[in-house]
Amino acid sequence: MSRGLASALRVLLAALPPLLLGACSALVPKVEVADTAPVRPAVIVAPPINNGAIFQPSAYRPLFEDHRARLVGDTITVQIVEKVAASQTSSSSIDKTGNVKAGITAVPFFSPSSFTRAGASGSSSNSFEGTGTTESANTFTGTITATVVEVLPNGHLIVAGEKQIGVNHNVDVLRFSGQVDPRAIRPGNSVASAQIANVRIEQRGRGAQAEAQAIGWLARFFLSVLPI
């Protein structure tokens, strides 16, 4: 093997892993879920108590009200009920027909029988018909308890949560994030996902079962470059 061919082969082998990783990452769709790492409440420095009163604004919680999430680190139960359905039907039809016919019946100084075959005719037709139907339906239900990770200036809560369930060698991961209006929180400290803004839901599996349903890395590489 020549020195030039060997160097070219080394360059190709060095560039192959990044290409394979790029092909794999390009074919795996990702959901932009907020950070679901556990969040600890910020330590509130208690102001000096000089009035001797029982009521302290820094640690106020309504006495005659169900506990509802309102501070960073509080938890809230999200009832995930997502149903999305779309349907589209289109139909088009075009039909066009044309006929042309011409002939000679009489010319001065010639007998009419001389033009029995002096005629021309033509016809054309064009037709097109097309139909199309598109349907999509998605249903997702579940329950997850999320944590308040941020309180916006208008009082809205940014919540994020993650649930992992492992059975044998398989792990099912459910991640959720969104923006909650405190007025939408129902008694029992729960809220429906349909009343949450900027919802991000991701459910994926890890393990042998998930790998059996995925395309191999070599097939992903060729799908990323072919067809050209």
Image: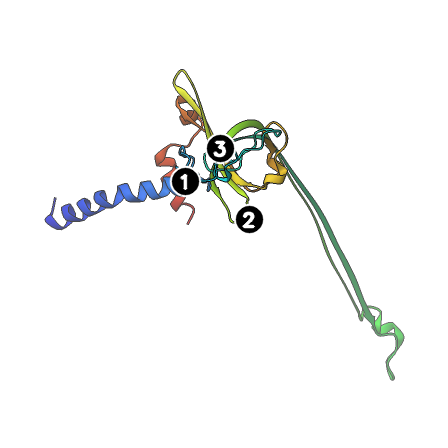
Q: Is residue 179 left or right of residue 109?
A: left
Contact check, label 1 and label 3, Cβ < 8 Å: no
x and y percent of residue 184 in the render?
Answer: 63, 38
Q: Mark 2 or 3 closer to N-term?
A: 3
Mark 1, secondary structure of its residue:
loop
Which label belongs to residue 226? none
Q: Residue at x 27, y 41 (%)?
A: 17
Return the residue at label 3. 74
Amino acid type for the residue under numbered disc 2 = Asn
Residue 25 occupies quadrant: top left
Quadrant of image for the N terminus: top left
Residue 199 occupies quadrant: top right
Q: Nearer the viewer, residue 30 or 11?
A: 30
Amino acid type for the residue under numbered disc 1 = Pro
Which one is in front in this view, the residue at disc 1 or the one at disc 2?
A: 1
Classify mark 3: residues with Cα within 10 Å, few (<14), some (14-19) or many (20+).
Answer: some
Q: Residue at x 41, y 21 (%)?
A: 170
Q: Mark 1 or 2 closer to N-term?
A: 1
User: How far is disc 1 from disc 2 in space, using C-alphas?
Assistant: 28 Å
Q: Nearer the viewer, residue 188 or 116?
A: 188
Q: Mark 1 or 3 closer to N-term?
A: 1
User: How far is disc 1 from disc 3 in space, using C-alphas?
Assistant: 25 Å
Return the residue at label 2. 154
Q: Nearer the viewer, residue 28 or 221?
A: 28
Mark 2, secondary structure of its residue:
loop
x and y percent of residue 219 in the render?
Answer: 38, 36
Return the residue at label 1. 48
**138, above or below 91, in the image:** above
Classify mark 1: residues with Cα within 10 Å, few (<14), some (14-19) or many (20+).
Answer: few
